[in-house]
Amino acid sequence: MMTISSRVAATAIASLFLISSAFAQTPAPATPAPAAKTEKKAEKPRSAESLQCSKDADAKGVHGKERHKFMSECKKAAKDATAKPKT
């Protein structure tokens, strides 16, 4: 025969299982879509100088830090070359 304290304990444990399953079914809060980040990248078109420098870097097989340095110098040289004929 079960005592009253045993019945109370069993009822409390059973109610905890039932309550926890009810709370587990709540939906997660909605988060904003990361589409805004991709739109910012898509807005910036590449210049003709940048595309040409990229092709040159690919032809030379430059990668990593050297590619970054090559691209920076190439684009700077291309901008300088287009700026000088104006004077």
Image: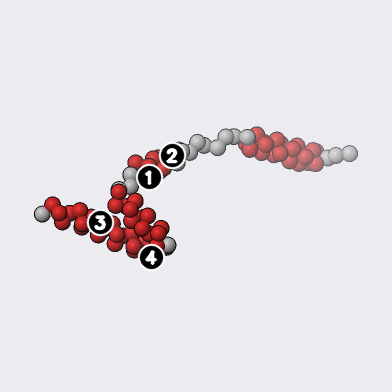
Task: Measure how far apart labels 3 and 4 are at the Cα level.
Answer: 18 Å
Task: Measure how far apart labels 2 and 3 are at the Cα level.
Answer: 33 Å
Disc sitting over residue 78 in the figure: 3
Residue that badge 4 annotates: 66
Q: Quadrant location of the N terminus?
A: top right
Q: Nearer the viewer, mark 2 or mark 3?
A: 3
Query: Considering the numbered disc 4 on the image, is that residue within a helix, a strand or a loop?
Result: helix
Query: Do the CB atoms of the residues marked 1 and 3 lie less than 8 Å apart?
Result: no
Task: Measure how far apart labels 4 and 1 are at the Cα level.
Answer: 24 Å
Which residue corresponds to the image point at 38% horizontal and 65% vertical from the top-left?
Answer: 66
Location of residue 25 in the rendering, given as x and y in whole percent from the top left corner: 63, 35
Q: Quadrant location of the C terminus?
A: bottom left
Task: Measure how far apart labels 1 and 3 are at the Cα level.
Answer: 23 Å
Q: Nearer the viewer, mark 4 or mark 2?
A: 4
In the image, farthest residue toward the left: 87
Q: In terms of depth relative to the viewer, which is nearer, 79 or 20? A: 79
Dot 2 or dot 1, earlier in sequence: 2
Residue that badge 1 annotates: 41
Crowding at dot 2, Cα within 10 Å, few <14 / some 14-19 / many 20+, comes out as few
In the image, farthest residue toward the right: 1
Which residue corresponds to the image point at 70% horizontal and 35% vertical from the top-left?
Answer: 18
Location of residue 85 in the rendering, given as x and y in whole percent from the top left corner: 15, 54
Q: Nearer the viewer, mark 4 or mark 1?
A: 4
Query: Do the CB atoms of the residues marked 3 and 4 lie less than 8 Å apart?
Result: no
Residue that badge 2 annotates: 35
